[in-house]
Image (cartoon, rainbow, N blue to C red):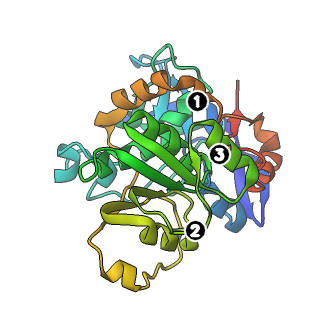
Amino acid sequence: MTIRTARFLGDGRIAVEPAELPAPKPGEVVVRVLRCALCGSDLRLWRAGAAQVPGHEIVGTVDAPGHPLRGRRVLVYIPVYCGECALCRAGDPQLCERLTDLIGWQRPGGYAEALVVPERNLILVPDDIPTDLAPLLLDTIGTAAHAVRLARRVVAAGPAAVLGAGPLGLGCVITLRHLGFDPVFCAEPAPRRAALAMELGAQPLAVGTADRRFPLVVEASGNLTARAQGLEATAPQGVFVVLGENSAPWTIEPTPRLRRKDFFVLRSFYFPLHEVDDNVALLRRARSDYARLVDGRAALEDLGALFARFASGDLIKPEVAFE
């Protein structure tokens, strides 16, 4: 089967090219992509190029004759997990001991008309969830909510701060407010994104300052300066969550304020499948807030222009649409 795919060539260049879709192996199915949302982590591939077709926030339909989910809308869970190791059996397939591939990273992803997906990586989309909002259940809600749930093992409620108001940071603002944290503050240098955070219920926090301390601080930008601010702004016995992605080495400077307090540093990756129902409930509860994040749509041929607007901060959570 020949499909259209987006190849990331580096330096912000994207070429739409035909490619042959490989035949599914046993235990795999073809998913026809309906939408694939852009993610901030994809900007690294947009700039540097990618060996595989990127795109990892995917909703599509199953195209497999005779399959019980044929024609149904599904999300694509990106860790290609084994299902057999101790962590998979414990319900944490995102932490699979044998995990080597992520769909959209080491395996072809959703900036294409179709892709091959392991059956165990299909998440059924409830009928009442609109197609354009379904991808939010992955990173924007799933990743954010999992991090907050982990932090709640230490800090159950109270004030919280989010550093960065990109799609993940804004998802954290909404999620925190609906999981019992109040007030929620947000630091963001881009005026439009900062304004949206305030409209979603956050209170402003000056960028770069650590004058105030919070029981929970979520760093959602990947910016190393923001991480330094977040460490300082974490209250004694509080939790600092490292959620934003950055491939550069991160050095923690042992300032007196850090040396003289007890606190927790928490790193969270993606989400376990057993949280999907709770994430769907979050989307239903705060649907109007989450819907404000989806603010752009383009065909595959216009993906380059869509990425340019996304990289400039003009768009929050745009999507490639194949309908």
Quick check: marks 3 and 2 in contact, CB under 8 Å? no
**Kind of residue at disc 1:** Asp
Specify which label sits upstream in the sequence, 1 or 2: 2
The mark found on residue 143 in the picture is none
- Mark 3 lies on a secondary structure that is loop
- Mark 3, other Cα within 10 Å: few <14 / some 14–19 / many ≥20: many
Q: Residue at x 55, y 68 (%)?
A: 226
Q: Residue furthest toward the front?
A: 211
Residue 29 location in percent, x, y? 45, 32
Q: Is residue 260 left or right of residue 118?
A: left
Q: Which residue is mark 1?
A: 289
Q: Quadrant of residue 205?
A: bottom right
Q: Residue furthest toward the top?
A: 127
Q: Is residue 68 visible?
A: yes
Q: Residue at x 54, y 28 (%)?
A: 134
Q: Residue at x 76, y 39 (%)?
A: 300
Q: Which residue is mark 2?
A: 223
For the N terminus, the image quarter is: top right
Q: Residue at x 28, y 51 (%)?
A: 155
Q: Is residue 26 visible?
A: no
Specify which label sits upstream in the sequence, 3 or 1: 3
Between the residue at mark 3 and the residue at mark 1, the CA separation in whole angstroms equals 18 Å
The mark found on residue 38 in the picture is 3
**Kind of residue at disc 2:** Asn
Residue 64 location in percent, x, y? 48, 23
Q: Is residue 42 left or right of residue 242?
A: right
